[in-house]
Image (cartoon, coloured by chain):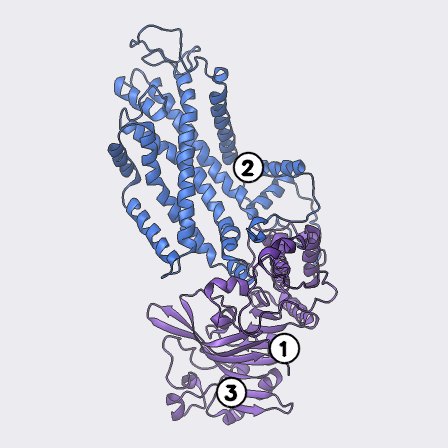
């Protein structure tokens, strides 16, 4: 397997609140290999979105603080990037898709200008006019794969800064080129007549259209990693299906790796290659998606899977996990899941299971990890 | 310098229509939106009329002011007596004790009063608005911006602790009489409201997902502030500013009225001091026109800007704007709505509520 696009190592994120510090993400490690889709599921408040925003350092700091860990993206540790340089790092390979398509587009800016802003930033960076981040052991690599069919402007090498800026500016793409690229990206997300919506304001479009435009803006950076934070949760089911289909097609076309956050197992099963399950700020299970579905190795995953409503069973109450998610400010000692866990024993109340050390190898040689003292007992649960 | 990101935010590359065509279209749309609401249309017409009259009075007073700046009424051109005339055809608003034509006098005061109101509200908008922008956007505790923000806000608290009219009167009392002194006094009490307003709006906007989305796309902080935050804050602020012009006018006139002689009537002519002078020197029961017409001038001007401000809210919001333009442009929609393709834009005139003026 090639070098991972992103590797998150022991990442902890804390929030400063009135009553002290709260760890929203605790010791999470995961790697995203090139071209793979990693899904993260969990209940509300388990730290999924915090994780998604902490990776590109989008959380407001303070109150948020990255307490420990590294986020290595293409050879650069994003945690170590000084705050003032962050605008140079963002938008250079990590694209974000947000949850609410309603609020994720600036209501006062026309569609064309929204997409053009993202396109222009990349073009300016590529032409060397905008300062670009060159930190870490390996500088960022701007020579991305061109998008199939739609890519009209090939990536340009970085022009050294300083006196060469004027020369670089002359090589900037003109208006016609920007417009063509904006239209290309809108067509890429399957908008049939992109010319007709260029002058629209976001509120004039449907939710699905807006989410497509968000995806187009994220893709216009030619990202090698796309972070999708519940991109389909705010959409109704038919639009959700359309957007999912679109994203699956785009994965093949752009070869981007994706971190896909969701609370919907159906969506994850549809799109992801690997699946991580989060509970109360911790990653409790991580493995290939089919393997996690077939033989979960953490009682929480098992409980979640059991709680999915069955289509053909119309009688009886829906299955649920007893109890509720603990508040992050008052976590139970030991394993965080033990008050709700059917397998809990004395050791669980005292001793937190080490993070993702219980491994098992699947038939294909992929590693399926979990954080549970009694991971072998999970298979025996109802 | 070498950073075009901040210098070229122009909307690039469109099939260009001729500029005057788009300007005409924009004006027509503006007109339609205003016409949809009768009151705001009245406000708009009044404001345009008032501003036009003020400009004419400044540039060519003989067109509108029958007795000119020297006020030769012909009624009495000797030393001033107590000779006063009620409204008549020759003097529609009557004359005052010095035989000055009140109609001319009120018109001559218009540019000054309007200018004062615009200048004070404008200064307050610029100064208070930019301070509010800074205080709202750079409020990370512990940083330089955080301390600046706290300093700005505590200073506004000091000013807001006093009722603005009382504080204004106190400042005038300290500075002494004079037009400039009153202006400075009103301005000093005025800017903190804009700090509060803008800061509140910025705080609301800056955590919206589209600001985070822009940040994720690598947009620089300065550009986020100007394009994504300021642009969405502008709408309520402009509305408030328009409404505020009338309030400033009233406050200024009140100070000029309450402290007699703070602005020395009759030169320069100013509505508040005019009222104060007449009120003190002549009994209203006999010489009602001397108080009525300057008050009416203040009232109408303040009202005009308030009405316009209400209408502007609709104009500035792209949601109501598009809906209003189309609802007025096509009063009778065709019975069968055109079928839109699955991915095409939703019909914007649906769903948006249309405030009906008449």
Q: Quadrant of residue A17?
A: bottom left
Which residue was labeled with disc 3?
Answer: A370
Could you tell me which quadrant the N terminus of chain A lies in? bottom right
Q: Secondary structure at mark 1?
A: loop
Q: Residue at x 52, y 57 (%)?
A: B220
A51 on left or right of A185: left
Q: Earlier in the sequence, mark 3 or mark 1?
A: 1
Chain letter of the blue region: B
Which residue was labeled with disc 1?
Answer: A36
Badge 3: how crowded within 10 Å, few (<14), some, or many (20+)?
many
User: B91 or B339, which lies in front?
Assistant: B91
User: A300 or B154, which lies in front?
Assistant: B154
Q: Residue at x 59, y 54 (%)?
A: A202
Which residue was labeled with disc 2?
Answer: B34
Badge 2: how crowded within 10 Å, few (<14), some, or many (20+)?
many
Where is residue A183 shown, x and y percent of the image? 70, 56
Asked if residue A67 is positioned above or below residue B249 in the image, the reply reads below
User: A132 or A290, which lies in front?
Assistant: A132
Q: Residue at x 42, y 90 (%)?
A: A344
Q: Secondary structure at mark 3?
A: strand
| Image depth: mark 3 or mark 2 in front | 3
Question: Chain A colour?
Answer: purple
Query: Do we see residue A309 in this rendering?
Result: no
Q: CA distance from mark 3 to mark 2?
A: 64 Å
Tags 1 and 2 both on a single chain: no
Q: Which mark is residue A317?
A: none
Q: CA distance from mark 1 to mark 2?
A: 54 Å
């Amino acid at each position: 397997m090639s070098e991972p696009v992103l590797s998150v190592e022991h990442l902890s994120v804390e929030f400063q609140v009135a009553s002290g510090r709260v760890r929203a993400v605790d010791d999470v490690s995961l790697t995203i290999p090139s071209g793979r889709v990693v899904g993260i599921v969990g209940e509300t408040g388990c730290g999924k979105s915090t994780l998604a925003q902490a990776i590109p350092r989008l959380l407001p700091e303070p109150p948020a603080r990255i307490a420990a860990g590294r986020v290595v993206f293409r050879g650069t540790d994003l945690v170590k990037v000084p705050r003032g340089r962050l605008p140079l790092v963002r938008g250079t390979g990590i694209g974000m898709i947000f949850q609410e398509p309603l609020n994720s587009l600036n209501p006062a800016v026309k569609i064309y200008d929204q997409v053009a802003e993202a396109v222009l930033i990349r073009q300016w960076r590529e032409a060397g006019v905008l300062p670009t981040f060159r930190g870490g052991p390996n500088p960022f690599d701007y020579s991305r794969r061109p998008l199939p069919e739609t890519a009209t402007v090939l990536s340009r090498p970085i022009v050294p800064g300083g006196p060469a800026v004027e020369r670089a500016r002359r090589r900037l793409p003109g208006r016609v080129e920007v417009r063509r690229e904006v239209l290309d990206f809108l067509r890429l997300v399957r908008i049939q007549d992109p010319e007709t919506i260029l002058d629209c304001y976001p509120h004039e479009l449907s939710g699905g259209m807006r989410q497509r435009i968000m995806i187009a803006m994220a893709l216009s950076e030619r990202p090698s990693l796309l972070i999708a934070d519940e991109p389909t949760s705010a959409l109704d089911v038919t639009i959700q299906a359309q957007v999912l289909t679109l994203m699956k097609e785009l994965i093949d076309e752009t070869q981007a790796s994706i971190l896909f956050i969701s609370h919907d197992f159906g969506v994850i099963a549809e799109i992801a290659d690997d699946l991580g399950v989060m509970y109360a700020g911790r990653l409790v299970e991580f493995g290939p998606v089919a393997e996690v579905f077939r033989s979960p190795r953490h009682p929480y995953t098992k409980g979640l899977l059991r709680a999915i409503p069955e289509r053909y069973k119309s009688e009886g109450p829906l299955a649920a996990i007893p109890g509720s998610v603990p508040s992050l400010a008052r976590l139970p000692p030991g394993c965080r899941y033990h008050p709700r866990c059917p397998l809990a024993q004395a050791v669980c109340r005292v001793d937190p299971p080490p993070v993702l050390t219980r491994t098992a190898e699947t038939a294909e040689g992929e590693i399926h990890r979990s954080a549970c003292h009694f991971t072998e007992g999970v298979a025996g649960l109802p | 310098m070498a950073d075009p990101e901040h210098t070229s935010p122009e909307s690039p590359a469109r099939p260009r229509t001729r500029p005057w065509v788009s300007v005409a279209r924009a004006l027509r749309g503006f007109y339609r939106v205003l016409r949809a609401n009768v009151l705001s249309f009245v406000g708009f017409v009044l404001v345009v009329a008032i501003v036009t009259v003020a400009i004419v009075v400044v540039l060519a007073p003989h067109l509108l002011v029958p007795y000119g700046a020297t006020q030769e009424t012909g009624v009495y051109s000797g030393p001033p007596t107590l000779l006063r005339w009620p409204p008549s055809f020759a003097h529609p608003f009557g004359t005052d004790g010095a035989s000055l034509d009140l109609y001319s006098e009120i018109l001559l005061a218009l540019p000054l009063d309007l200018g004062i109101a615009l200048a004070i509200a404008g200064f307050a908008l610029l100064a208070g608005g930019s301070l509010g922008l800074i205080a709202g956007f750079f409020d990370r505790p512990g940083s330089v911006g955080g301390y600046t923000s706290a300093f700005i806000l505590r200073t506004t608290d000091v000013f807001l602790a006093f009722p603005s009219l009382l504080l204004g009167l106190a400042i005038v009392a300290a500075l002494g009489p004079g037009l400039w002194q009153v202006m400075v006094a009103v301005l000093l009490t005025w800017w903190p409201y804009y700090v509060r307003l803008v800061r509140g709006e910025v705080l609301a906007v800056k955590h919206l997902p589209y600001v985070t989305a822009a940040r994720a796309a690598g947009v620089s902080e300065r550009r986020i502030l100007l394009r994504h935050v300021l642009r969405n804050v502008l709408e309520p602020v402009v509305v408030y500013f328009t409404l505020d012009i009338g309030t400033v006018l009233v406050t200024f006139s009140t100070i000029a009225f309450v402290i007699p002689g703070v602005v020395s009537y009759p030169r320069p002519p100013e509505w508040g001091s005019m009222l104060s002078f007449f009120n003190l020197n002549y009994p209203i029961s006999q010489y009602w026109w001397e108080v009525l017409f300057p008050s009416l001038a203040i009232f109408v001007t303040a009202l005009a800007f308030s009405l316009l401000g209400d209408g502007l809210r609709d104009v500035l919001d792209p949601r109501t704007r598009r809906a209003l333009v189309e609802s007025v442009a096509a009063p009778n929609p065709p019975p069968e709505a055109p079928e839109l393709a699955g991915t095409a834009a939703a019909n914007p005139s649906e769903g948006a509520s249309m405030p009906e003026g008449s």
